[in-house]
Image (spheres, helix red, strand yellow):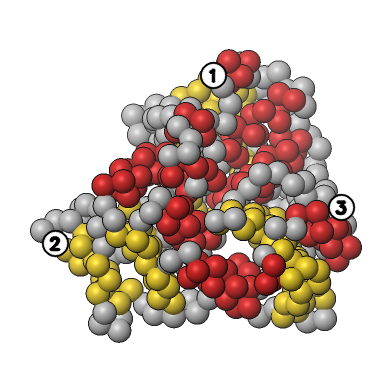
């Protein structure tokens, strides 16, 4: 394709900013506009549930780049102005103020929107954690209160529980799944993680549905489980997953399913690409459609999208990877282990808090998990998870879901 004269990137967080940086690094000299709903300068999301939440970092430290670096990109930054509509054929985006931004190429990087519980809106003390402002609001409640209920047994819920315990808060974690992070690391490894949380004082209520939030005069005062038990709370965090933020693309002419549906080159339509959490693309190596919600993918996919904007026609075929820090445990997960996969310890010893597990399913290795053994996990990944044809190897870039 002809190099675009102007590229418009919708979403200014890690995926959007990484696309802009990759374009400049790869020699693009045309006009760049980054349109973002956030009022803050681009910041990193993984620290929100850890360092920013605990107060170990000032919020400003989560910024991805200093202002002088952003200025060096020679890009137009439009902040605090969410996109509300799109015409993919015209590559035109309409914002909440009525502004219309057009480009020769369009990159969609609008990320995720947290799922919420019924009755959550308008009830104070109930939080989600997606933005810098979310982290600040939750921290204020954790400092002021002493009892937190986390709803959701996935990565984000587990990280918040660990951070809150480190702050001395009483934490109860409730989730429908039978294991902590079970959908990401399976029941066996999830059981080991649950034991770590229990040892650190988290009260786990797994395998039970949350029925409702208890309202105490407009402020949450507890969480009612399907069993009838009410978990008392001064604050509640709802971490039950997220959905791609693509509602503004309805009627745009793009195909929307589980995200913006793209081809193997991350192209959703002529001159229109998607990157990051909102992008669903065909992974040629796996022979299936894939959408990944983590920092590593946002960075790596941006490199491919930038190259393809400049005419490379490169398929995006990464080896999926994410990591999470909880207490003194660093978990690094390579590949796509599923709850149905069988896991076995390949190196180390779980009782010593250092090991590598390999996942097998249908006769093949589908994933590798390192628990405080990053080097060994990488070596086993290289041995068992060969880079798919036409692809690029996954680099170990700081990441969390």
- The C terminus: image quadrant: bottom right
Q: Earlier in the sequence, mark 3 or mark 1?
A: 1
Name the front one of labels 3 and 1: 1
Which mark, residue 390?
3
Residue corresponding to mark 1: 67
Residue 273 position in % (x across, y down):
63, 42
Q: Nearer the viewer, residue 198 or 79?
A: 198
Residue 313 position in % (x across, y down):
80, 42
Q: Earlier in the sequence, mark 2 or mark 3?
A: 2
Given the current orientation, which residue lies at the most extreme bottom position?
Answer: 227
Residue 287 in which image quadrant: bottom right
What residue is at 37 percent from the left and 67 percent from the top?
Answer: 172
- Helix or strand or loop: what does disc 1 sit on? helix
Q: CA distance from mark 2 to mark 1?
A: 44 Å
- Helix or strand or loop: what does disc 2 sit on? loop
What residue is at 80 percent from the left and 44 percent from the top?
Answer: 314
Residue corresponding to mark 2: 216
């Amino acid at each position: 394709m002809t190099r675009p004269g102007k590229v418009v990137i919708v979403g200014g967080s890690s995926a959007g900013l990484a696309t802009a940086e990759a374009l400049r690094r790869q020699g693009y000299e045309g006009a760049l506009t980054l349109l973002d709903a956030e009022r803050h300068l681009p910041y990193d999301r993984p620290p929100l549930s850890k360092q920013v939440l605990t107060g170990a970092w000032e919020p400003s430290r989560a910024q991805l780049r200093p202002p002088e670096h952003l200025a060096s990109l020679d890009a137009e930054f439009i902040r605090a102005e969410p996109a509300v509509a799109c015409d993919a054929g015209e590559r035109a985006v309409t914002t909440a103020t009525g502004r219309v931004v057009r480009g020769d190429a369009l990159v969609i990087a609008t990320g995720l929107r947290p799922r919420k519980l019924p009755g959550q809106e308008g009830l104070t003390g109930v939080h989600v954690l997606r933005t810098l402002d979310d982290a600040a609001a939750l921290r204020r409640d954790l400092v002021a209160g002493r009892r937190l209920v986390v709803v959701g047994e996935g990565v984000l819920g587990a990280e918040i529980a660990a951070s809150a315990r480190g702050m001395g808060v009483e934490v109860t974690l409730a989730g429908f799944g039978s294991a902590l992070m079970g959908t990401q690391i399976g029941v066996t490894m999830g059981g080991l993680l649950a034991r770590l949380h229990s040892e650190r004082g988290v009260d786990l209520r797994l395998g039970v549905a949350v029925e409702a939030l208890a309202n105490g005069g407009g402020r949450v005062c507890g969480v009612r489980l399907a069993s009838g038990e009410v978990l008392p709370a001064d604050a509640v965090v709802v971490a039950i997953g997220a959905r791609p933020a693509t509602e503004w693309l309805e009627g745009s002419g793009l195909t929307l399913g589980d995200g913006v549906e793209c081809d193997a080159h991350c192209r959703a339509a002529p001159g229109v690409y998607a990157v990051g959490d909102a992008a669903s693309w065909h992974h040629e190596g796996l022979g299936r459609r894939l959408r990944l919600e983590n920092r590593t993918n946002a960075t790596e996919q941006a490199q491919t999208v930038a190259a393809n904007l400049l005419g490379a026609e490169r398929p995006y075929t990464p080896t999926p990877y994410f990591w999470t820090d909880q207490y003194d445990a660093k978990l690094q997960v390579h590949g796509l282990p599923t709850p149905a996969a069988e896991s076995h310890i390949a190196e180390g010893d779980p009782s010593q808090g250092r090991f590598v597990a390999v996942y097998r399913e249908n006769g093949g290795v589908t994933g590798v998990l390192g628990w405080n053994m990053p080097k060994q996990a990488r070596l086993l990944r290289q041995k068992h998870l060969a880079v798919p044809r036409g692809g690029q190897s996954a680099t170990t870039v700081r990441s969390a879901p």
